[in-house]
Image (cartoon, helix red, strand yellow):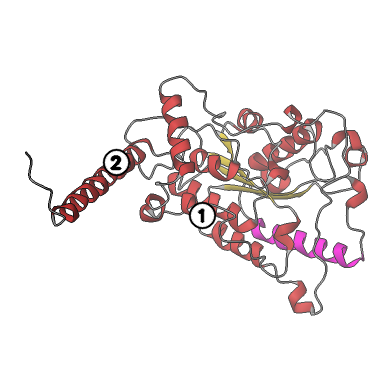
Amino acid sequence: MGLPTSTSDRPDEWARSLAACLGALGIGALLLFIVMIAVDPYDTGKFGWLGIDGVDDRNTHFATASRARDPLFDSAVIGNSTAQMLDPALLSRATGLRFVQLYLTGGSPREQLGALGAFLRYHPRPGALVFVADPFWCVHQRVEYPGDRFPHWLYDDSKLAYAARLLSWPAIEHVSQRIAIGLGWRKRNEPNGYFSYEDIWHPGVFRATNAPRDPVLVESAAGGENFPEIALLDATIKRLPASVSIVLVVPPTLSTVIPKPGTPAGVVREACNAALKRVVAGRPRSNFINFRIDNALTRDPDNFADFIHYRPLIADRMAEGIADSIKFGEAAKINF
């Protein structure tokens, strides 16, 4: 006949069970964290011991962090989706450099500068940099965005901030993708970052959407000459060696949405163009090109997917002018 179990033994049993459960969870979390460190789910180069190359992610805010560090490339195109159609392979063939696309869909100037900072950490002496400056570069005051809109922790140099994000469901999903790439079960994104929206938007079909958001002139004349985003770009470029070719590009839009001269938006556009031109004035093998002009190309809706997203015919013409600017600077011939 067994002895009755003392109620005083039950708390000890619960404590041991709880400790075992918490211990197992702790060991599991530690093992998962080690896997995260070994795989480097976003391919930032901050960690990673397995030698897996690239990611499979259409979200450019995440995928660009991988491309920014790729040693295959020495030059970059930087912008938002208005830079997307510039084919880095075409620029590479025309210049002898090795271009990568670092466009960020919907990316603000500050976010684009974050991608540039990541690129420069791994490529301190690039061959050339091409910036596609849409109207958001022309604002007179910095636009504040929600803190979680963009993963700055992917682009800064803090390993601690990056590590703090690794125990999350999105990171676990990216780990599985990276392991599949490493095993050959999954194809990585195109290494040079090129993705044509012709693949998802019907060629020749114009959609009357995405009108450019041109800023208007502020009240004070002093404020009208103030472009804080361009000032940051200027400061960044001034820190680069003179050997780095810089081409600043204003992307084309359909001619019907080009600001009219003398209007508030037109005055800002002219002042912004002048500010961008000053950034590269006198710099060797560098140039400012304004493609937002009224001509036969920009009057034809068939050359645009919407008001701001141009199609390959225009992109190829732009690439010709950019490549010529990298070779000859301000003396380049712009056939547009």
Q: Nearer the viewer, residue 267 or 157?
A: 157
Up-down relation of residue 150 to residue 332 (above or below): below
Q: What stretch is highlighted in magenta?
A: 262-281
Chief secondary structure of the magenta portion: helix
Quarter residue 278 falls in: bottom right
- On screen, 55 above or below 247? above
Q: Where is residue 250 in the image (x, y as percent from the top left)?
A: 75, 50
Q: Tell me the residue that label 2 is attached to.
A: 28
Q: Which of 99 and 194 is in front in this view?
A: 194
| Quarter in which the C terminus is drawn | top right
Report helix, strand or loop for mark 1: helix
Alpha carbon distance from label 1 to label 2: 28 Å
Amino acid bearing label 1: His
In the orientation shown, which residue stands out farthest toward the front? 1
Locate residue 255 relative to residue 317 in the image: left or right: right
Q: Which mark is residue 152?
A: 1
Determine the residue positioned at 57% across, 55% down.
113
Residue 128: say if magenta: no
The quadrant of the picture occupied by the N terminus is top left
